[in-house]
Amino acid sequence: MTGRPARTRPDDQPREAAAPPASDPPPVALPDAPRGVRARAAALAALVTVAALCLGDAVARSYPFGFRTRSVNDLGNQFVPFHAHLWDLLHGRGDGGLFLNWQSGYGASFLPDLGTYLGSPFALLVALFPRDRIDLAVYVITLLKMATAGAVMTQLLLTLRPGRWWAAGALGASYALCGWSVAEASYNPMWLDGLIALPLLCLVGLWVLAGRRFVVGALLVALMWIANFYTAYMATLGAVLLLLTRLLVDAPTGAPLRQRLARLWRPVARLAGVLALGVGLAAPMVSVIYFGTKHAYPGRVMEFNPKPWTDVLARLLPGTYNFSSPAVYVDTVALLLALTLPFNPAVPKRLRSGWTLLVAAVALSFQWAPTQLAWHAFSVPNGSQYRETFVLCGLLVTAAWLSFAHGTPGRRPLLAAGGLLAVIAAGASRATELMRPWTYPLLLAGLAAVAVALLLARYAQRHHRPLLAALAVVLLIGAQMGQSAATMAVADRLRLGHLDDYAPWGERQQKQQQLIADADGWPRYRTDPGREQTVGNDPLLVGGQGAQYYSSLTADVFSRTLTALGGGWYSRGRSVQSLDNPVTDAIFSVGARVHSPPDPHRDPNATIDVEPYVTRTSVPPLVTVRPAVKKAPAFGPSPFRNQELLLGARVYTMADEIAIRGADGSLAARTPEHGYRLPPGPTKHSRPKALLTATCPGGSQVFLWAPHYWGVAALRGADRPPVGFRGDNPVTKIAPMQPLGKAPASGRVEVDLTIQKGGTVPADSVGCLDTGRLRTAVDRLRSHGATSVHVTDSGIRAELPAGSRGLAVVAVPRIAGWQCAAGDGGHRPADSYLGLIAVELDGSATSIDCRFRPPGLRLGSAVGAAALLVLTLPVAYRLLRNRRESRHAHH
């Protein structure tokens, strides 16, 4: 078991034998492992992966095995709602189609979101689950993706080098259960397509280098780039590095330099061609996402700050967790084997050196800003800055396999690897924020399992005891499963401590969905799911057509328009919230609105016995006609005046004599913009109070606009409950304008402010809405509005009153991609009226027709068609030639 197999070193070959023969065989020869062996290895990897994940979630009592939710951060806000929308589309229930999502953001481009969040073929599996088990559907898809990644990795390992099937299966599971996947990608399911892409693209490259499966290879590259181009890009870089290393290691040393370069140039060119064709086939989706990103609200520009090497070393160990450091954990068995590679004499020297240098170079590239930027397509990501970590995990696992498959490491390699592991553990001990009480016990348990398994295997070999050998294998796999399950459980528990979390589908969402279905009148009017959101994409989850929208591709024009109208957002402008305001409801034709109590899962003080309800309002149609303007209007600093500008009527009276005083009666500190500064509360349980006073016309509706205030506001004497403001800072999140209630007959408005995190309140923070004026404005817009409106999956058409002149304004954000025509005229890029779609009318047209095509689709389709032509022409030529030859032979 520990002896070295006889072998012939490549550099011991005579010079004549190293020169390539005249036939120029492929530079990479692939071993043909029996299908049964490959199938057993893949099945073992998938089984171990799923078992460890489920065990870890069960230990953590996480959904679906316990009371703790797993819907943290983007999983609850984005992935689950987008999968719910896909379910609706697949069952013919959603508003919109591939091009348009009518439910979010008052009309958003859907194809970029489809490619970003739902491009994986696994996403289609949601159709097999009930709609109210959407969380379970996403969980099962997550398990299947990780299991598939492990299974594909086993195929790569057995293709790189034949070996024991159970070892390939176990190491495939080591890759699937790496720290990156269990700690980060498990709640970002779209990234898991990259986990699959890395070994699959390596397989494609090996096929191409061996002169096989060019067409299949290009199609698989396209599939991976469509599934998730972001992580596919990283996987492609990793695969290219692995394949180039393989070529250099296997290159003959005795031939002249020119012959060696020629032999390397051809396979590299073939590899580059297949990758280019695959990416070209994916261009229709990739280009749409690229241009969607260009038109998205800009995220925060960040600088890369490498983590200390002690943190990197700590993340190699089991049971550690941190959001911002590279999760390079692979179980102790795989890590120990990988560390034996530089010392294992059974492995050829060039292979040892090449793979060791490759792993070291990739690890170093994570800590240098230019190479780290290259890993992320030259854009520093928001949030976790080590999203390429799965590539390093994959290389560690392949190194472990190459060491084991060339011959079980002997005593010296194991002792050297153990010494390196001790150095890693010692260095990690300084990363006190990452190390957990159970880290070292888990590590020692893994090492003990390896030691006992080696002793059992050696005894079994000497005394011919196959059952003991099988027991050694079970012990190794058991240790692997235990460590990975524990690491998963740790991640499940600790994520809840520093990330926002959301409840899975339950009674709250069920009631909201039913209310929306009963009130729905689309496209005569919109139904908004409400201001008290459950997740960042409520319209996708429970239905309706609201302002709420959270995506990496939220359009810049939409976010800025809603902000100018007093809207609020999270996630640096990309998670736009609903705006509970009758003026904006009239502007955007929101005729029904759901009012729900705060979500008790997010707010422990929420009243659970309050039932949600719907209010209905008479609103203009989606398309209205406005007078022509000589000069395009522009928004100003006041959201109250901006709402009036877009509505076309004065409906607010700005409050007079606004002042804010502390509990002692002293005037609050002023800001340079003449607003008021409110300091944060001193403790969690002691909240300072302040009183805002102003004067409004009696009976008017009072609205407070305080985008950068964090606290609670309550109008004295009002019949409305207090409202919360969550305005952190202008970069991270701002609070929307909120209704406080009706001003008393005296006109004296008194608002109690309970300060939490504090912030600022603008000088023109209070607006007094005259509901009578608003009704008059709405009636005027209704009388000049569209007589009928028809929406499709890719556009909107409206019939207008005869003789309509001026501007037809469509209550849809004027995002890039809209083209409109008046009457029988030709389509051209739509005009914009304060961020909404506008079409000029000369009095002759009685209808408008607007069509939407995602930017980049035409260019991407052209590139994709060219790639398809290049891919299929040689195949078609060979088929025609074979057919002609067979016909000549027949005659």
Image: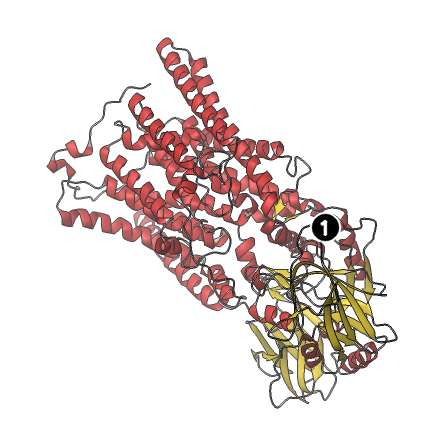
Q: How is the image coloured?
A: secondary structure
Residue 755: image quadrant is bottom right
Quarter assignment of residue 871: bottom left
- Left or right of 471 on screen, residue 81: right
What residue occupies the far top of the structure in this picture? 463
Task: Name the spot of residue 623 as percent of width and height, x first.
Answer: 70, 77
Q: In this view, does 209 lie above or below 850?
A: above
- Apparent side of residue 826 relative to residue 212 in the rendered image (left or right): right
Quadrant holding the N terminus: top left
Q: Nearer the viewer, residue 228 or 435?
A: 435
Q: Can residue 336 be seen in this view?
A: yes
Going by the image, does 479 lie left or right of 500?
A: left
Please tell me which residue lies in front, 331 or 704.
704
Residue 690 percent across, percent down from the top left: 74, 64
Q: In this view, does 769 lie above or below 217?
A: below
Label 1: few (<14), some or many (≥20) within 10 Å? few
Tell me the SS state at disc 1: loop
| Amino acid type at mark 1 | Asp
Instruction: Judge whether residue 524 can be spotted in this image.
Output: no
At horizontal 55% and vertical 59% (from top left) the residue drawn is 552
Residue at 22% across, 26% down? 7
Residue 868 pos. (x, y %): 41, 58
Q: Quadrant of residue 731?
A: bottom right
Q: What residue do we see at 51% from left, 43% from top?
A: 322
Choose between 751 and 80: the one closer to the eye.
751
Q: Could you tell me which residue is drawn at 70 percent across and 53 percent down? A: 534
Residue that numbered label 1 is attached to: 603
Q: In this view, does 781 lie above or below 126?
A: below
| Total number of numbered discs in the rendering | 1
Q: Nearer the viewer, residue 402 or 842?
A: 402
